[in-house]
Image (cartoon, helix red, strand yellow):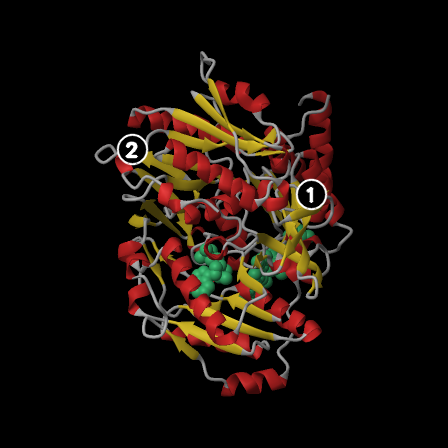
Amino acid sequence: MHILVFVKQVPDASQVRVNYETGTLIREGVPAILNPFEEHAVEEAVRLKNEYGGKVTIITMGPPQASEALKQCLSRGADKAYLLSDRIFAGSDTLATSYALYEGARKIVELEGDVDLFFAGKQAIDGDTAQTGPGIATRFNLPLITYLIKIDELNLEEKYVIATRLTEFGQETIKAPIPVFFTVEESLNILSHSPLPYLIKAEKAEIELLSGKNVPLDKEQCGLKHSPTMVKKAFTPEKRQRGATLSGTFDDVVSQTADKIAPFLKKVS
Amino acid sequence: MIDLSKKDSDISHYKDIWVFIEQTDGKPAAVSFELLTKARELASQRGCGVVAAAVGKSVSHLAADVFKYGAEKFYIIENEIFANYRTEPYRDAICELVIKYKPEVFLVGATTQGRDLSGTVATALRTGLTADTTGQEIDPKTGYLWMTRPTFGGNLMATIYCPKHRPQMSTVRPGVFKAVPVDDPKEGEIISEKINFTEDQIVKKILKKVISGEGAVNLGFYDVIVSGGKGMGSKENFGMIKELADLLGGTWAGSRMAVQLGYIPQSRQVGQTGQTVHPKLYIACGISGAIQHLVGMQTSDTIIAINTDREAPVFDVSNYCIVEDAVKFLPKLIEKLKNMQKFGG
Ligand SMILES: Cc1cc2nc3c(=O)[nH]c(=O)nc-3n(C[C@H](O)[C@H](O)[C@H](O)COP(=O)(O)OP(=O)(O)OC[C@H]3O[C@@H](n4cnc5c(N)ncnc54)[C@H](O)[C@@H]3O)c2cc1C
Ligand SMILES: Nc1ncnc2c1ncn2[C@@H]1O[C@H](COP(=O)(O)O)[C@@H](O)[C@H]1O
């Protein structure tokens, strides 16, 4: 079985601060991390590999530094990692990103063989768009299962998977043929600690490089210039201010609080 | 999959503002009517029409509401195969409508279903999509749609537009706009389209649907979230959190500490590594307000925090700050609210 995981390196959004004077993000000193959802995607992929045999391949599109994120995936037990990096991709929106990753993934299929399970995170914590996974799945014309919380059954002989996803109202369980594309929730699994052999292997592993040199690309679909969406402006939202501290006796504060909340009270018939 | 060669590449042929009417088992999602209301405003600026579109096993019964909130036309595709939402057949149905009728703008609610659908539709149509927006405006000069959305956990806002591709697509967060019916609703036109594929062409099968109770839940669906942290002191004390949530027709959640202490399941964690929420009311009880927690809830409309520590950072984002012991405060608050509920104040 071959599993391909799409991972993104992101600035740790929780450490990004806003300079309210200039209206810009302060990104200096903000560490780049593996997008948290992908940690769980890799965890699941490695778990499935250990149970069913096969291999796990990782791909990321990004600048050379993104190989750090790839190393992290290798230290979690992935077998091979590809960095798709080319200046032509700079400024890609989600449509252009899904195009680049689609071509990168096709190259990986050529080099590593057919993929049975595709994984991406639910969303990246920097952009929060949750579109790249569905975009890649659409380009491959694969069945898509978003918001995955559980793989209930994997049948490699009969080539199907049964999986549970979150919906607006709860959950649903779906049967889909393999190959299939998942975007994953964090509650999919609990992260394990990387065993030492994985860490050693990751240290030694070579990151494979993909770019316009070895991946056939339609330049008309790449980068800022060919991204349909453009940023008109970016600005900082109004800073939330500390509001009123409710004061008085304990009972006063209870009453005041109840008054604020009362409009939300469920109506009783 | 759709045939892209049939898509008109002349963007001047695209007209009207469309709203996807989301439904589950025939019940419409409230956000659809919020979007119709907003679409009316955008359409009057743009000088175009407001159109609704729905796909489902049976959706024609939604027409009255769709017209009440201002749609002039209602395109529907009804078929047994659409009984449950599934990405691929819904995508193909919507793409057919778009290719045939060429909307200039296509708005979808940023719900689980809407996000799943719009990403695949936009890619299939090779157009731009601005996800999870909180603002929509027409540029008076060009007529382009300006779509504003928060990024970096709400730390930055970006206004996005899509000048050369149609339709201009975006998903809009539920609760951002208010649904307001039109004063004199007119009987609009219902246009029913057929789609010629069958169940055996759809590879995904839904085996089971569970409406959530205690387990995994989409917190984004609720207007009120009552959330607890380490300061609640025990799993039993979360009974108060649940009771308050229930009184307010909302749901309960918590911090990562609450998860780690075993008070609540991870599926109900709010924050950077949990869910991002933006309810109308968020009540934080015994939560310090670490940045990883704040990025998941600071765009809530109203935040009320209860914490014994006057300096707790959660107060910096709260509209109302209550410096009290939550374990003592909540039972009194619940009692008071129950009285108000019974006696109307
Ligand atoms: C990579 C990373 C990701 C993270 N992701 C998340 C995330 O997604 N979500 C998240 O929540 N955290 C996350 N965290 C953890 C975060 O940093 C905090 O540790 C966590 O939010 C603290 O939870 P807490 O507020 O419940 O506990 P504490 O910080 O211990 O705060 C407890 C609070 O309760 C108050 N208190 C005590 N007793 C009472 C009482 N009787 N009544 C009222 N108040 C009382 C105290 O004054 C204190 O302010 C993450 C951390 C890291 C490093
Ligand atoms: N540059 C990238 N390289 C690899 N995977 C990506 C990239 N961007 C996004 N993804 C994947 O798509 C998911 C959703 O990203 P987004 O649409 O940006 O929210 C991420 O969690 C990743 O799994």
Is residue B318 at least partly visible in the picture?
no
Tell me the mark number nearer the camera, choosing from 1 and 2: 2
Residue found 34% across the figure and 26% down from its top = B43
Image coordinates for residue B184, horizontal then vertical, percent: 45, 11
Question: Circle 1 sits on which residue?
Answer: B329
Q: Nearer the viewer, residue A145 or A64?
A: A145
Relative placement, left or right, of B283 versus B211 is left
Q: In this rendered view, identify the residue nearer to me: B337 or B101.
A: B101
Judge left or right: residue B95 versus residue B321: left
Disc marking residue B13: 2
Q: Are marks 1 and 2 in contact (CB under 8 Å)?
A: no
Above or below, A35 against A66 in this view is above
Mark 2 nearby-residue class (10 Å; few <14, some 14–19, many ≥20): few
Q: Secondary structure at mark 1?
A: helix
Residue B33, horizontal then vertical, whole percent: 50, 28
Residue at left offset 43%, top offset 62%: A102
Quadrant hosting residue B40: top left
The chain containing the residue under callout 2 comes to B
Tell me if B95 is positioned left or right of B239 in this view: left
Q: Disc 1 versus disc 2: distance between alpha carbons?
A: 61 Å
Labels 1 and 2 share a subunit: yes
Quadrant of the image occupied by residue A99: bottom left
Residue B11: percent from left, percent from top: 28, 38
Q: Chain of mark 1?
A: B
Residue A214 against residue B112 in the figure, above or below: below
Q: Is the shortest distance between ligand 1 and the CB of mark 1 under 8 Å?
A: yes
Residue B249 lies, in percent from the top left, at 66, 34
- In the structure shown, which secondary structural element does the residue marked by tag 2 occupy? helix
What amino acid type is highlighted by mark number 1?
Answer: Phe
Tag of residue B18: none
Amino acid at dot 2? His
